[in-house]
Amino acid sequence: MKTLFYNKKVVSALVVPGLCIMLFAIAAPLIISIILSFVKWSGFGKLKFIGIDNYVRLLTRDPLFYRSILNVLLLIVVTILFQNVIAFLLAYMLLKIKPGYSRLLRTIYFIPATLSLVVVTKLWVHIFHPSYGLLNKLLVSVGLSNFTHAWLAEPGTAIWAVIWIMIWQGFGWALLFFYSGLVTVPQELEEAAVVDGANKFQLYTHVILPYMKPVLESIIVIDVISSLKQMEMIYLSTEGGPGNSTQFIALYLYQRAFKYSEYGYGNAISVIFVILAIVLTVIIQKAFRRGED
């Protein structure tokens, strides 16, 4: 077997197909997108080269682009500080109870993650409906009718309702990642820390979380990428409204390219989208590496 992998023809036969797929599926579309970002094109007719005009317009004269970025950053913060914290605590609790109960609860918590995005979105659209929605009916039934809202139709509540749908659907994945990471923490390590006098808080902050640093890094990177590419749930629930209060960058890209037939402008957004994803990923990795140093 060792001799086989020293054969250059065998190595080429194994590597070249994968490289071709990567070039076809990632590199080629990215290069085409970069080229199209410098043109004005409606999808039909001739392409008109306009240089960096699309980028100038995007970065200096498009408040909706910045609104979509702010909504993405809000989702990232809520996901990291709310979803992940609760998922970590719940995963730790599931690790300490009986295996049978743990398996049952993990299955229940993971069910939303197995459902179709369309099903999940439509379910919550009906729950948030101002007339027959379950949420408003519950509020009225307990005497809190003053707190009823048209949750997806009011700018003040729509963004939080949409974020709630995303977190509800993705919570099972966060719980699974944290549970899988906690399982790998050696029991002897925890016992040694307790013997040395560590309390619960110190056990988490000085033993468990540092040991799980690679898992935490992966989870946060996934959260960032997931937040950037959120599109389907928003499109199916609010389409970026009301008043563009729930506009996200992936949906904005889609609308500019396919709804308004501004393919050049849409590709400029996609290039910024890729750059933003790379920059945020590098920042996260640098932050974790600095922590290790």
Image (cartoon, rainbow, N blue to C red):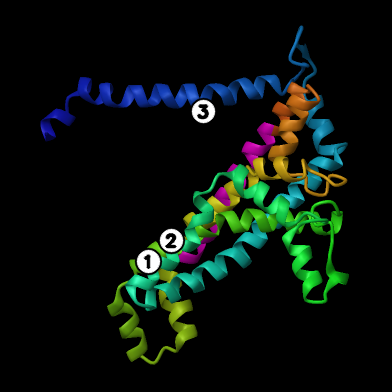
| Location of residue 249 in the rendering, given as x and y in whole percent from the top left corner | 72, 41
Residue 164: x %, y % from top left: 68, 58
Mark pair 3, 1: CA separation: 38 Å
Residue hosting label 2: 107
Q: Mark 1 — residue?
A: 103
Q: Nearer the viewer, residue 15 or 182?
A: 182
Q: CA distance from mark 2 to mark 1?
A: 6 Å
Q: Report the amino acid beneath label 3.
A: Ile
Distance, label 2 to label 3, CA atoms, is 35 Å
In the figure, residue 127 lies in which quadrant? Answer: bottom right
In front: label 2 or label 3 = 2
Q: Residue at x 66, y 32 (%)?
A: 271
What's the magenta region?
Answer: 270-293
Q: Is residue 141 visible?
A: yes
Question: Dividing the image into 4 quarters, which one contains the N terminus?
Answer: top left
| Nearer to us in this view, 94 or 51 | 94
Assess whether mark 1 and mark 2 are in contact (beta carbons under 8 angstroms). Answer: yes
Task: Identify the main secondary structure in magenta.
Answer: helix
The vertical placement of 207 against 27, above or below, is: below
Q: Residue shown at 66%/38% (left/top)?
A: 273
SS label for mark 1: helix
Q: Quadrant of residue 45?
A: top right
Query: What residue is at 46 percent from the left and 86 percent from the top?
Result: 200
Q: Is residue 62 above or below residue 141?
A: above
**Label 3 sits on residue:** 26
